[in-house]
Image: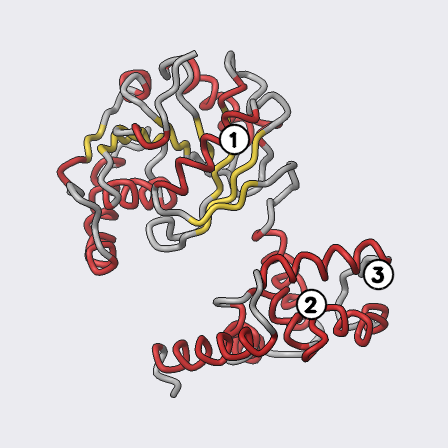
Amino acid sequence: MSRPAPQDVRTVVCAGAGVIGGGWVAYFLARGYRVVAWDPAPDGEQRLRHLVAAAWPALTELGLAEGASIDNLSFEPDLAKACAQADFVQESAPEDLELKRTLLADIDAATPEGVVISSSTSGYGMSEMQDKCTHPDRTVVGHPFNPPYLIPLVEVVGGASTSPDAVQWTADFFTLAGKSVIRMEREVPGFVANRLQEALWREALHMVENGEATVEEIDLSITDGPGLRWAFMGPMLTFHLAGGQGGMAHMLDHFGPSLLSPWTRLEAPELTQELRDAVVDGCEREAAGRTIDDLVAERDRGVIAILRATGRA
């Protein structure tokens, strides 16, 4: 099996060029790749070029890779002809399982041997989508966040028939392409970030329905509250600092009983010793030698920077 090394990828095929697919096109162009796009919509090319042109000023401000140019984009109306040119494929079709299963099989049939095929699906597992493929071992989820040309995160996970090598290759490729990568060890519906977003979203809907908070209050509670900290530390390190010098261990031991309080409509897991230790150990790994004082100073600098950048300080 021949597969280009991640650093040798030159041509990326984007199959599906709507909001997400078009965002991928803009991103890959800005990173210096040649991009071949395909979309079945009659006005697909026109909409795609409009999206790329609209995204280009922001990408230019962030800094373009050497050789990056909108001129490196070509639109191919024939899917097989597009895929035949691929060193890597990113599929971004609508969230319709049967559509994705059929499309991935068609892409698989037309793409050179060994070339990885990645899907932008936001909820389906690759195990659900790869069963029509002749070579499912090279199909991987590469889940981005909108807009893909600005938001760094990509969640990478394979399916039951995906080879571990293809998953690692995809994680390496996205990392080289400038993305922040979560390489998941197992399939979970909704992956990581969407599950967390969904928990917050569901609780927000409950609060509106029950008259407990308004839409404006809910948004303000995040933008002027924990969202300022989550932007650079996330919920785990944020709670690590809530324990003071004792860190996450003290936080869990002190506040753990509150998990039984009816603060949300979600059922909390039992705070077993194993779960406690896994969370504490994870925070220590993420801190990577930084003391609580180091992290507090880092957090404070970050909050000040965000407040100033958004005109709130």
Q: What amino acid does circle 1 point to?
A: Val
**Pointer 3: what residue?**
271
Q: What amino acid does circle 3 point to?
A: Leu
Q: Mark 1 Cα within 10 Å, few/some/many (few <14, many 20+)?
A: many
Which residue shows up at 50% across the image and 26% down it? 166
- Residue 207 percent location from the top left of the image: 68, 72
Asked which secondary structure carries label 1, the reply is: helix
Which residue shows up at 82% across the image and 57% down it? 269
Residue 79: in sight, yes or no?
yes
**Could you give the CA–CA distance between mark 1 and mark 2, rounded to whole angstroms?**
38 Å
Asked which secondary structure carries label 2, the reply is: helix
Q: Nearer the viewer, mark 1 or mark 2?
A: 1
Residue 215: in sight, yes or no?
no
Q: Left or right: where does residue 44 sit relative to residue 166? A: left
- Residue 29 percent location from the top left of the image: 24, 41
Q: What amino acid does circle 2 point to?
A: His
Q: Mark 3–mark 2 contact, CB under 8 Å?
A: no
Which residue shows up at 57% across the image and 23% down it? 162
Quadrant location, the N terminus = top left
Please give the label number shown on residue 206: 2
Q: Left or right: where does residue 6 sit relative to residue 221? A: left
**Could you give the CA–CA distance between mark 3 and mark 2, rounded to whole angstroms?**
25 Å
**Pointer 1: what residue?**
167
Going from N to C along the chain, the mark reached first, 3 or 2, is 2
Query: For the view shown, which residue lies furthest in the left direction?
Result: 71
In which quadrant of the rendered view does residue 8 lie? top left
Going from N to C along the chain, the mark reached first, 1 or 3, is 1
